[in-house]
Amino acid sequence: MPAGIVSYGVYIPKYRIRVEEIARVWGDEDDVAQNLNVFEKSVPDADEDSVTIAVEAGRNAIKRGEVDPRRIGAIYAGSESHPYAVKPTGTIVGAAIGTGTEFTTADFEFACKAGTAAMQACLGLVSSGLIDLGMAIGTDTSQGAPGDALEYTAAAGGAAYVIGQDDLAAEIEEIYSFTTDTPDFWRREGRPYPEHGGRFTGEPGYFKHVTNAARGLMKKMGTSPQDYDYAVFHQPNGKFPVRVAGKLGFSREQIDPGLVVSRIGNTYSGASLMGLAATLDAAHPGDRIFLASFGSGAGSDAFSIRVKDKIEKIRCNAPLVEDYIKNAQYLDYALYAKHKGKLRL
Amino acid sequence: MPSTRANYDCETMRSVSIIGAGCTRFGERWDDSLRDLVVETGIMALEDANVSGEEIDALYVGNMSGGRFVEQEHIGALISDCAGLSRLHVPSTRVEAACASGGLAIRQGVLAVASGYSDVVIAAGVEKMTDVTGGTAADALAAAADREWECFFGATFPALYAMIARLHMHEYGTSREQLAEVSVKNHHNGNMNPISQYHTEVTVDKVLNSPIVADPLRVLDCSPITDGAAAVVLAPTELAKKYTDAPIKILAAAQASDTLALHDRRDITTLDATVHAARRAFRQAGLGPKDIDLAEVHDAFTIGEIAAIEDLGFVEKGQGGKTTEEGLTQIGGKIPVNTSGGLKACGHPVGATGIKQAYEMVLQLRGEAGKRQVDGAEIGLTHNVGGCGGTALVHIMSR
Amino acid sequence: MSAAPRFWRHIPQRYNLIGTHCSNCDEYYFPPRDICPNCRRKAQMEDYKFEGTGKVVTYTVIHNSTEDFKRQTPYTLAVIQLDEGPRLTGQVIASPDEVEIGMRVKPVFRILGKEGEKGIIYYGTKFVPAES
């Protein structure tokens, strides 16, 4: 029996900081935003974290699909910024969305692709009949070290997907993953900010894994870019996904609806799932969506997704990605630093 | 409102009087511990009453939070011991109703004497608040509110009164200036009171421009953190003359409770506990608000006094601000309120306040209040509130 | 000082506004009451999950807080009347000039507090203006 997406929901905090404001503070060039193709990023409120974002996204997914939360047999939340190193985000999400006690959970981490890995795990449990519904979440309030290049793009947001076998809004036709041991970007236990290999994160990191996963999936399915209406690639900035799409043979039109990074930054574990949600917000029944995430460390998960009729019935039951993007309140660098806890108290 | 029970039948219970009273100076008493303050006030009260240790039948002490402020509970045994009464094995009881602990101690003492169970009883109150930092003190005081459902969500004690003030302003047009007038009046009175914490005058402008605590309340709308202790000695009226020429008769000792959390109140701008305690007190005494010559009311925050004069029945609901501004409650006005300086200027050592109110009333009714004396003071009322209205005590006393 | 058990006991209330309803007199209670003040022992109490929508009855902007909330000031605290009837005390996330008596609000899931750097994180419900 096919399995796939029963419902989805997102959450993006309302605060923003403009890239040019960050550049002003660090004395960087005016054209940083142009170079990254990222103009502003989302900032969490002082009382928000990956858990609160996961709960809001999860509640939106429940609401959109009118899902009975007690049917959820597994919750997997992927993040680089779980507030606890020990005590899973999934337990709090479960209590907050009303799953009751009959479910399994454990937290996921794989840099920016923890959310898609969670989705694969849910697919497994659902397809085997071991559980009825699963919830996969990608959520982050990622930290960029002050003055580091990543500070321009490290943003906050999350997306939640309810995975099941009946009543699908979109079927997941096939998955393929490509994973290696590549130290392109990492964070040691207990350290507040990640380290990265600069240009090493490009070709040997992002491009190698995304292209291999994408080609692997299309080979497995016998499909090509023309067989898809939309494509979503992980978006650490506004340039990489455009370049990899071109390399693989996907067009600008195919990737545009899912390209949200220019306006909200890189939501890390939530990023590809956020792009997918923005695409689902626009897609029609019968459309086919190609998705390839990327997580440093490194790996890429590729999905082939077919949109079903149900999407039109449920789409407007919860806020769209665009609704959250438009609800924006701007901060200066000082308030941003206070919100993100960068000031040592 | 449903009718309220009188629960004090004057015909079968004997009359009680205050035969002596004492009160320490209120303020930041760095050199004195809780025990020191208790002993200081105890001696004052006993000497004033001409009573010896052997004559004391029972002790009642009001103390809100010895545990949080000085890590000491078992305050009943503590004060009996400090007072040198442990060898006489005097029964000693601590009572607690947050900021109404002192008033509660008086009522418990009155009941013990009125019932015939005891003859000479001491009702004392003490709080030592400055041995901890301001933040810890604020947190200890917040326990007077609903910890689980108010404080946990970020409520502070001033915030609750601030919400009462805002709604009172919205519904009745009470202004910030009218709130400030309470502070001005009480500072003016406190300046004439030797035991008061503050001897400074303030102006409406100074109050309005003081730092914001919880909008609309500012620092000068709020009573301070204070150390202090007070005590009164109670005896049956029929025996009082043995001790003093000027016994002060207790005509009523009434108490009422209400919901703990502000959000559960019937009407957020009315302290029903005050309303019911007052009605019971007036019924016990066979009097009405117009018979009262002066009152000590619970002005933990300026809005507290405004609500109090309404809820006690001195003015109509909603008129508290206007009548205060017009001078109704000044010394020389129709009903002087808080001649001691109130909680605002005299200070608010939580457990002691209710007793201090009685001490002030004793001085006034004896004609010993010096510069703040109210001419012809014959019948006085004291009003003590716990939290933002969970408990209220009202006593009426006369010469 | 850890209040973990006291917090944990009320997670259904803090996360999901689970209160009680007395089907004898049809009154709703939040926080939940075991004893209905109207009916006392004649009450028939059942759990009830509140929508969380309601209006502001009164509010204040707190500038001086207790230790736990020091870094969050100024913040707005309000008495909110839920649509089903009961009132509760909660924070409203809005700028001070946005808040007014009678304003409609809806619930959001936020951090209420933390026990320092090492202790547990308390999550729960705050409120935002209904149109946001």
Image (cartoon, coloured by chain):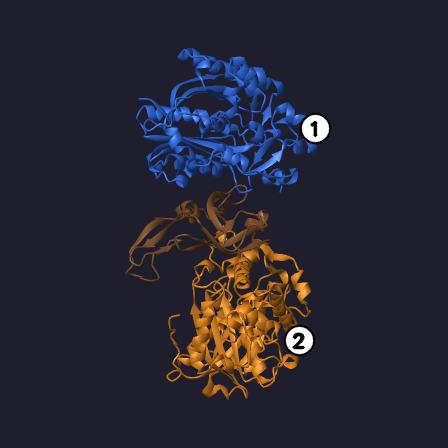
Image coords of residue B40 (percent x, y): 59, 72
Q: Nearer the viewer, mark 1 or mark 2?
A: 1
In the displayed structure, B34 sits above or below B253; it is: above
Give the image quarter of residue B178. bottom right
Q: Nearer the viewer, residue B335 or C58?
A: C58
Instruction: Check residue A208 in the rendering and tell me which mark sits there, or answer none.
Output: none
Residue at horizontal 53%, vertical 80%? B380
Amino acid type indicated by mark 2:
Met
Image coords of residue B265 (percent x, y): 44, 62
Instruction: Check residue B192 in the rendering and tell me which mark sits there, or answer none.
Output: 2
Residue at the disc numbered 1: A28
Secondary element at image label 2 = loop
Q: Residues within 10 Å of mark 1 (few under 14, many from 20)?
A: some
Label 1–label 2 contact, CB within 8 A: no
Residue A244 appears left or right of A21: left
Q: Which chain is painted in brown?
A: C
Image coords of residue B44 (percent x, y): 58, 77
In the displayed structure, C89 sits above or below B193; it is: above
Q: Chain of mark 2?
A: B
Image coords of residue B66 (percent x, y): 52, 62
Q: Which chain is painted in orange?
A: B
In the displayed structure, B295 sits above or below C7; it is: below
In the displayed structure, B53 sits above or below B140; it is: below
Residue at horizontal 62%, vertical 78%? B331
Distance of label 1 from label 2 (alpha carbons): 65 Å
Secondary element at image label 1 = loop
Residue B133 seen in this snapshot:
no
Q: Which chain is painted in blue?
A: A
